[in-house]
Amino acid sequence: MSKFFVKELAELEQASIITPDTAERIRAYYAQKPGLAANRLVIVFGILGALLTGLGVILIIAHNWDVLGKVPKLALALLPLLLGQAACAFTLIKKAESTAWREGAATFLFLSIGAAIAIVSQVYQIDGSLGGFLLIWMLLAFPIQYILRSSVASLLLLGGITWYACDIAYFDRSNGVAWWYLALLVLSFPYYYRLYRDHSGSNFFAFHAWLLPLSLLCALGMFNHLFSTTADEELTALLYINLMSLLVLVGHFEKLRQRRLIVNGFLVCGSLGTIGMLLFFTFEDFWESVSRLGMAETLDVRVAAPYWISLLLTLALLVYMLYRYRGTAINAKVSAFAVVLALFLLGFTQPDVSRILANVAVFVFGVFTIRDGAQQNKLSILNYGLLIVALLIVCRFFDTDMSFIARGLLFIAVGVGFFVANLRVLRNRRNA
Amino acid sequence: MQKTLIIVAFVAMCIAQWFIPFNTILHQETILSEGRLFKLRTEPIDPSDPFRGKYITLRFAEDEVAVTDPQAWQDHEYMYITLADSAGYGRVSRASLYEQEGDDCIKVRISYVYEGNPGAVVFEYPFERFYLEESKASAAERLYWESRSDSTQQVYAVIRVRNGQAALENVMINERPIADIVRALNEKPE
């Protein structure tokens, strides 16, 4: 970009658009500016190189060469580990300030640990579970993110522990809570905080801002094993709505809000998830099963402990955010967890009222979103609000006894709403 | 100061990363060299999906044990079986929910409990995969079909047991390691 710009300078100078003095100053500026783009490219290639070499080595060793005896096979399996550790030691001593070296060496070491464990298992025909294998790998690789200050190691760890949690909770006999997932996640928080504090403008930060909420969304369902079997689905749904509000709240942190919306995975996941969950609550089935439950035993503090803990966490963060960012507008969707709790308490005795109020809640959130879009002059948010209302209508299209005429009129009304709202925003922009 | 701390942490991490594979190797080598040998008949060798690597899955003939009180075995993940030698092959002589010692006991995973009278507990051995060289996988599959249709073929796994732990040593077809048979098949032009 800058090179192209510098080339254009001569033409601009000739056309007397800029003075020779200005042109010279621009040239001098670009000449002394550090090659940011080039540096970034070195980092990307460093990581890609380490990833591909690491995976390539794993694949070659996985061929399981029968011509080699046990000892050479094991030596070959452990060689990448030695190389990875040597690369990391060299980086720590000689290249500690080079991001490309730190990320590349960390990535290679991370993969070589997995290769070493896998191949030892292969040589000795050990038929361990995938969850156990992933856990040992992640425990051994956990310190890399801190020691080498490596974001790729942190992302790989996050991916690995999420896979482990899903394996324990959903795939492999699906009967456990992956406590190690929580432990390793909490122990990684200082790394995430440092990334937020010092590198909130980086791409690594953006990747974390997506992977972290997605990981929580995947893994949180593991707590349903702790709830009593009569109310596990209902309490898991409530747990998820708390998580959604929590994600929306985290998405309001200053440095996340400063980035483009597409970077703010917390807000996007939380907001979409809130609406998805609320739409789920507008169906009859959920409330019917709630009405069959007893309030006291369902919400018992011991039985529903994960739910109450998540509620307290969300509430505490909400209070903190309201205090910390006084005067800044907070997305209305953060209140979803409280709304749903109220509906749930009501649902034990009045399931129909709760269902109707859930519809109202989705509609109100849709309208608030449309208003936010109009106020911020952002078509994407405005249309998202309209989409929420349209989805609500589509859901009701299937399970109500409304006449075809009434349904048709509703659809036309929303369709006209789309046109009018978009036109108004576009006209406002033109007039501004 | 901080750099020293990082180096110390790094060295500790490296030691841990070596400790796990070495410990596994040592553990397995001890079982293989000192463990008691058993031959377990395997049912058809099932070549597995290519996504998870080139191995064959072993399905053992001795994979369930009759129990009189199936209820008691529900909700348990592991149990202990005692093997006894019967006509050259290992047979399950006893099953227990409590830890057993000795060079004939294996900790196995309960996969299913049949209720009824008498009931049965189906279990999985801790060694149901046999890794082969990649190029031999398809030949092993062919061999499997051939040996399955031929009832004179004896397919069995050689295992070693020591103090409740077991290790898979080899898979044999008629006293020959499967890898050797596959190698011979590959060398022979069709």
Image (cartoon, helix red, strand yellow):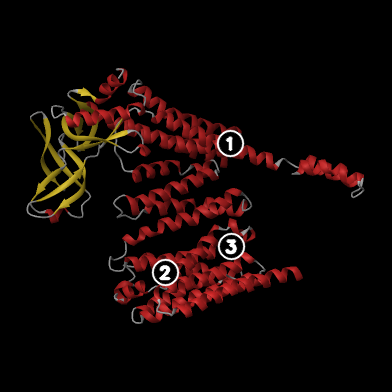
Look at discs 3 and 2 and give the one toward the viewer.
2
Q: Earlier in the sequence, mark 1 or mark 3?
A: 1
Residue B35 in view in this figure: no
Mark 2 Cα shell of 10 Å, populated few (<14), some (14-19), many (≥20): some
Residue B7 image offset from top left, x and y in percent: 52, 37
Q: Which residue position is annotated with label 2?
A: A280
Residue in view at x 16 percent, y 27 percent: B153
Residue A46's disc number: 1
Residue A178 image offset from top left, x and y in percent: 36, 53
Asked if residue A236 is positioned above or below residue A123 in the image, the reply reads below
Disc 2 residue type (three-letter):
Phe
Q: Residue furthest front?
A: A405
Residue in view at x 38 percent, y 45 percent: A135
Horizontal side, residue A34 vs residue A343: left or right: right
A35 and B176: which one is in front? B176
How far apart, in angstroms, are the residues tagged by discs 3 and 2? 28 Å
Residue A335 image offset from top left, x and y in percent: 50, 73
Quadrant of res A264? bottom right
Q: Earlier in the sequence, mark 3 or mark 2?
A: 3
Q: Which residue position is annotated with label 3?
A: A253
Q: Residue furthest top?
A: B188
Residue in view at x 59 percent, y 74 percent: A416
